Amino acid sequence: MAESVAFTNVCTALENETGFSRVEARGTVRLAFKGAGLDAKSVTVEQMKVVLDRVLPAELEIRGIADSEAVCRMLSRGLGQIASGGSEETPEDVFCGLGGN
């Protein structure tokens, strides 16, 4: 399953910032998505920022992360480096690149 760049970026940063394992970070973000009615495959940067602002802080507090709002602000700033699209390249994009088209 291919996830969006925004999902992957936030999970990796959350793992680094909190000491969560890869599974814990991804699971926590997925639970926040579930609460927001979003899907990891298609979440956009803008949607991710809303989740970071409104949903993820509570999920982090439940898991004992101190100052969860500050952690989420840091994660949100990291999203500024990502283009405002949704998911990564499509398989068609990859295959076109391989074919030289």
Image: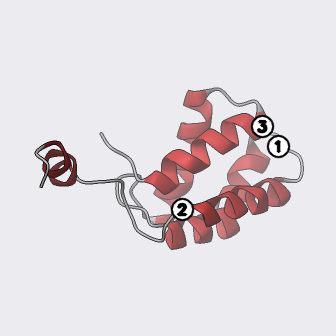
- Element assignment for label 2: loop
Counting residues from the N terminus, which is met first, the one under dot 2 or under dot 3? 3
- What separation in Å lies between label 3 and label 1 (alpha carbons)? 7 Å
**In the drawing, does residue 59 fall left or right of residue 22?**
right
Look at the picture and state if 56 lies above or below 26. Answer: below
- Between 30 and 97, the residue placed more toward the observer is 97
Image coords of residue 10 (percent x, y): 60, 50
Rendering quarter of residue 42:
bottom left
Image coords of residue 79 (percent x, y): 61, 61
Tell me which amino acid carries mark 1: Ile
- What separation in Å lies between label 2 and label 3 (alpha carbons)? 21 Å
**Label 3 crowding class (10 Å Cα cut-off): few <14, some 14-19, many 20+?**
some
Cβ atoms under marks 3 and 1 closer than 8 Å = yes
Which of label 3 and label 1 is nearer to you?
Answer: 3
Tell me which amino acid carries mark 3: Thr
Q: Mark 3 points at which residue?
A: 18
Which of label 2 and label 3 is nearer to you?
Answer: 2
Q: Name the residue under label 1.
A: 65
Residue at (30%, 54%) from the top-left corner? 89
Counting residues from the N terminus, which is met first, the one under dot 2 or under dot 1? 1
Q: Name the residue under label 2.
A: 82
Cβ atoms under marks 2 and 3 closer than 8 Å = no
Image coords of residue 57 (percent x, y): 73, 57
